[in-house]
Image (cartoon, rainbow, N blue to C red):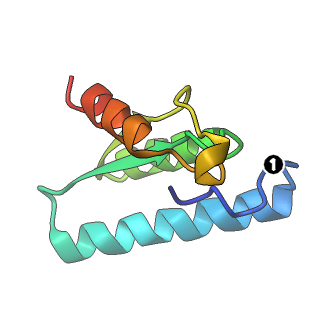
Amino acid sequence: NLGTNDNLRGRNPTFVAAYSATYLDLVKSAAAAYGEHTHFFLSCGPMSNAYCDAVLWIIRQAQAMGIKATFLDHRGFRSPARCCGHPGADEDRQMAVSTVK
């Protein structure tokens, strides 16, 4: 998940703006390279929810440009200590099942 390690927890406006602009540029570049039929899934969670608002903003901007983009909500899944705060295999399976519903 882009954003997990980008120091957005404190909502520092400078970091959030730089993150958002860079992520949007990445989506625009990928859309140009892969074509108009490409659909992008931008996710947030489960290790942090600090960047979800930024991801939702990026999706709205991309959609306004005609880019197909959808929010992939991975909030609410566990990130156990046994995996250093990362989702384990069980959580990965749960996220996959929730994604294909």
Residue drawn at 22 percent across, 77 percent down: 33
Residue drawn at 25 percent across, 73 percent down: 32
**Image height check: is 25 above or below 70?**
below
Q: For this view, does 63 lie left or right of residue 80?
A: left
Number of dots carrying numbers: 1
User: Image quarter for residue 34?
Assistant: bottom left
Q: For this view, does 19 lie left or right of residue 98?
A: right
Q: Residue furthest left?
A: 37
Viewer-closest of 83 and 14: 83
Q: Residue furthest top?
A: 101
Q: For this view, does 43 lie left or right of residue 83?
A: left
Residue 48, given in percent of the width and then of the height, sits at 66, 43
Which element is circle 1 on?
A: loop
Residue 90, given in percent of the width and then of the height, sits at 39, 36
User: Image quarter for residue 72?
Assistant: top left
Viewer-closest of 8 and 61: 8
Q: Residue furthest front?
A: 82
Amino acid under disc 1: Arg
Camera sees residue 71: no
Residue 20, given in percent of the width and then of the height, sits at 62, 59
Camera sees residue 35: yes
Residue drawn at 56 percent across, 43 percent down: 57
Query: What is the quadrant of the C terminus in the image?
Result: top left
Packing grade of label 1 (10 A; few <14, some 14-19, many >=20) is: some
Residue under label 1, please give it: 9
Residue 60, given in percent of the width and then of the height, sits at 47, 41
Residue drawn at 36 percent across, 53 percent down: 65
